[in-house]
Amino acid sequence: MNKKGITMTSIVVYVMLFFIFTSVAITISTNINFEALSEKGNIINNKNIQKLQFNLLNSAKSSSNVYNISGKVVFSNNDEYYFDSTKREILKNDTTLIKDVEKFNIISSSEFVENVNENKSVSVEVMLKKYGNEKIEKMIFSVGDKNE
């Protein structure tokens, strides 16, 4: 007996093949999306580190002293930098400078440089996290500009 048309077995095979190809496509697209987000997080973290470095350097160059006052970096030109842990931001003069900050510590400059005047330099450690990508950076800045 020769039957023509769609049989129950062929429908089951087609449905199984459809679900297999769909799951493979979803797995591949999810992996590509995750890698793209991770790279985007890396780019955002690097941009924020550079923005923080630029602002701290400009404040240090235009100041003669720097102080650690209650967890704030305070320069003699009246620039203040501090970490708001509830919003995960570093603020400069009460304005958001960078976001996605996990940790911001003011550390002793003497860990990096011997015989350093603590009122003439500042060291910070910052950890940023965006889209699962973490970046930790330690920075040290000396106040004043020798070109003046």
Image: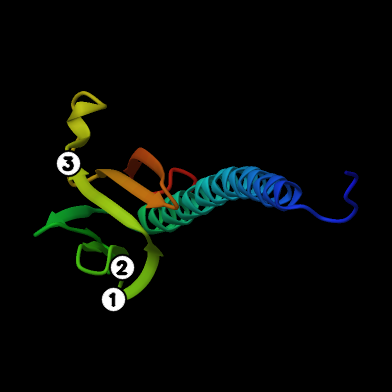
Kind of residue indicated by mark 3? Glu
- Looking at the image, which residue is at 68% across and 52% down? 15
Kind of residue indicated by mark 1? Asp
**Tag 2 or tag 3, which sits nearer the N-term?**
2
Q: Quadrant of residue 115?
A: top left
In the image: residue 108, left or right of residue 52 = left
The label on residue 94 is 1
Residue at the limit of the structure toward the front, as seen here: 1
* Residue 20 percent location from the top left of the image: 64, 43
Q: Quadrant of residue 13?
A: top right
- Label 3 crowd bin: few (<14), some (14–19), many (20+), radius 10 Å: some
**Tag 1 or tag 3, which sits nearer the N-term?**
1
The N terminus lies in quadrant = top right
- Mark 3 in CB contact with mark 2 (< 8 angstroms): no
Give the number of callouts.
3
* Residue 5 percent location from the top left of the image: 87, 56
Kind of residue indicated by mark 2? Leu
Which element is circle 1 on?
loop
**126 vs 124, nearest the viewer:** 126
**16 vs 49, nearest the viewer:** 16
* Residue picked out by circle 3: 118
* Residue 43 percent location from the top left of the image: 56, 49
**43 vs 4, nearest the viewer:** 4
In the image: residue 128, left or right of residue 26 = left
* Residue picked out by circle 2: 91
- Looking at the image, which residue is at 52% across and 53% down? 47
Q: Gap in Å between the C-alphas at discs 1 and 2?
A: 5 Å
